[in-house]
Image (tube, rainbow, N blue to C red):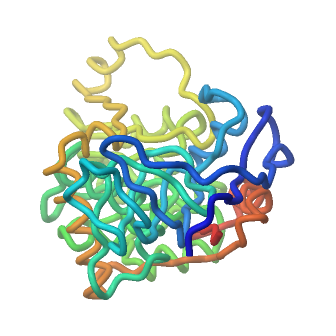
Amino acid sequence: MYSDAMQAIQIHTTGSADVLTLTDLPTPTPGPGEALIRIEASGVNFIDTYFREGRYPAKLPYILGQEAAGTIVSVAPDVTSFKPGDRVAWCLIPGTYAQFAVAPAARLVAIPEGVTAQQAAAAILQGMTAHYLLHSAYTVQPGDEILIHAGAGGTGLLFIQMAKALGARVFTTVSTEEKATLARAAGADEIIFYTKEDFAAKVKSLTGNKGLPVVYDSVGKTTFEQSLQCLRPRGYMVLFGGSSGAVPSFDLIRLSVMGSLFITRPTLKDYIATRADLEHRAKDVFDAVANGSLRLRIEHVYPLADAAQAHRDLESRRTTGKLLLIP
C-alpha cells in the first residue's frame, strides 16, 4: 500500500529520548539511482542515540535510523538492478524510523528466501559488523583466543557465533548472570564478569600470562586501558565503538612499550564501500541466518510510535539481543 503521506520519527532538537517525535510527512520520491521502499522493520542501534544526543552532528529536523528491511514500491527510471516488489535490506543510510524511505539502489541488498524482513533488519548492520571485524579488521584463525566485549548485546551474540564458526576460543565480558547465560548459549568459552573482577588479570590467568592476539572493544572509555593489557606482543586492539564514552588521548609510544601493539578504529562503511564487499558480507550473513547456523535474538519489537521507549531500554544497558521498530 502506497500513500502520499507517511509517519516518521523526527528530532527537532537534540537531547534525551523525549525529543523523539512522531511526525506526519510527505512520502519521499526517489531521485536518480534511488528506490522508494515500504519499511517493514527498522533496527535500533546505539549510533541512533548518538545522533539524538548531538554527539554526532545532523541537520535538523532529522529522521533517525540507519538500518531497515522492506519491499520496493518504486524505482527511479535509471535503476535496473531492482524493481517494485523486490524484498531488500540496507544500512548506514539515514531515515529508517519511518513508514517509507528512499535509498540508493547501489546500497540495497536482496533478502533471500527463508529470511524474513524482521530477521534481515536485525542482522544486516550488526551481522556485517561482526563479519568485517572477524574477517578483515583482524583475520581470526582457527585456534585464536580472542576477547569480545559486551557479548550479550545484539552485535556480541552474532559475533560470538561467527567467531566460534571460525574455530576461535572466545572470551567475553558481561555484567549479569542472565547475560552470561545468553553468551554461553551463543558459544562463548570463557565468561568474565567485568563488574566483579579485573578482566585483564582474568585473561592473563586464562592464557597462562601469554595474552591475546586481538581484543574487540565496542565499549571504549571504561575498558580501553585494560583491553590493551590483555594483548600479547604484536597484538591487535580493534576499537569499534564507544558505548561508555570516548577513549582519552593516547600517546602512541605506549604501543611500542607494551609490545609493538596495533590499534585500529574501523567502521563498517569502509568495509562495504564496494558493491562486491557489500554483497559478499550480506550474503554470508543472510545465508547463515537462512540455514540456521546464525541464530538471531530479537528481544523486543516496538511500534514506530514507541521509538522513545526503545531508546530508553537500549540506553539502560538492560537489553540483550536486537530491538526493532515496526511502522
Q: Is residue 7 above or below residue 59?
A: below
Q: Nearer the viewer, residue 318 or 171?
A: 318
- Count numbered badges in the picture: 0
Q: Is residue 314 visible?
A: yes
Instruction: Please give the name of the residue rendered at 75% of the width and 40% of the height, measured from the top-left corner.
Output: 11
Residue 125 percent across, percent down from the top left: 41, 57
Q: Quadrant of the C terminus?
A: bottom right
Q: Nearer the viewer, residue 67 or 209?
A: 67
Q: Quadrant of residue 54?
A: top right
Residue at image point 56% right, 60% down: 100
Q: Is residue 26 above or below residue 122?
A: above
- Whether residue 172 sits left or right of residue 314 in the image: it is left
Q: Quadrant of residue 128?
A: bottom left
- Residue at 38% x, 54% y: name it: 35
Whole-percent x, y for residue 77 in the image: 29, 51
Quick one: 141 or 266, which is closer to the camera? 266
Q: Position of residue 283 (x, y in %)?
A: 21, 67
Query: Can residue 157 be seen in this snapshot?
Result: no
Point 31% across, 73% down: residue: 111
Quadrant of the snapshot with the N terminus: bottom right
Question: x, y (%) of residue 62?
Answer: 66, 38
